[in-house]
Amino acid sequence: MTNMSKSGTNPPNNPAPKDAKASAPKRSLTPRRRAREYALQGVYQSLVMRRAGSIPNKAAIAKQLAEDPAFRRCQLELFQGIFEGVLDRTDELEAIITPALDRPINELSPVEHAALLIGTYELAADLSVPYKVAINEAVELAKTFGGTDGHKYVNGVLDLLAQKLRSTEIQAG
């Protein structure tokens, strides 16, 4: 009983709050990162709706995301470009992704699937984004929102796709 009261009355010996704070992942929420995070949320929502047999409403999803007070701190043009670009070209992007997968695309988690769609969209359609940035941003989305090792899978698949989609850029160094 004295051990319990002793440890209970001596909070400085319990470093958990400091350690927990120090080990928490740091997220750089730049307007561009926020735009990609909101795009991921919208693409995720669209994928979940499609898997449930519904037809996603792009405008309704975008409107719902825009209601979040933090949304105004994202780079709107980037969000719109990625979100609308991915939803408008999902079938085309999935056709690019599928040969690089080790399983059917519908067996991916919706977060990994959405991160791969975003990364592939940026690799294929937005050459202003360096391929390393496109891959890194998709990996960071998977780390932040996905399962334990999902980001490693996203990284591997996008590395393969970059060899095909950005071969000139990769060879240039």
Image (cartoon, rainbow, N blue to C red):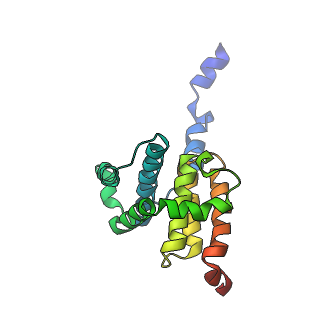
Residue 140 versus residue 171 in the image, above or below = above
In the rendered image, the quadrant that contains the N terminus is: top right
Of 51 and 161, nearer the camera is 51
**At 46% from the left edge and 46% from the top edge, which residue is drawn?**
50
Q: Which residue of the protein is positioned furthest toward the right in this rendering?
A: 102
The answer to which of 71 and 129 lies nearer the viewer is 129
The image shows residue 42, relative to residue 6, as above or below, that is: below
Residue 27 placement, left or right of 151: left
Question: Where the C terminus falls, by quadrant?
Answer: bottom right
User: Number of labelled discs?
Assistant: 0
Which residue in the rendered view is the most extreme toward the bottom?
Answer: 172
Percent x, y for residue 145? Answer: 53, 49
Tell me which corner region of the image, top left, top right, bottom left or bottom right, holds residue 77. Answer: bottom left
Q: Residue at x 54, y 69 (%)?
A: 134
Q: Is residue 89 visible?
A: yes
Residue placed most toward the observer, 149 or 48: 48
Q: Where's residue 72, x and y in %?
A: 30, 58
Position of residue 83 measured from the top left corner of the image (x, y, whole percent): 41, 60
Q: In the rendered view, would you say 130 is above or below 44? A: below
Q: Residue at x 39, y 67 (%)?
A: 81
Q: Residue at x 62, y 25 (%)?
A: 7
Farthest-out residue, top: 1
Q: Quadrant of residue 171?
A: bottom right
Q: Is residue 26 visible?
A: no
127 or 143: which is nearer to us? 127
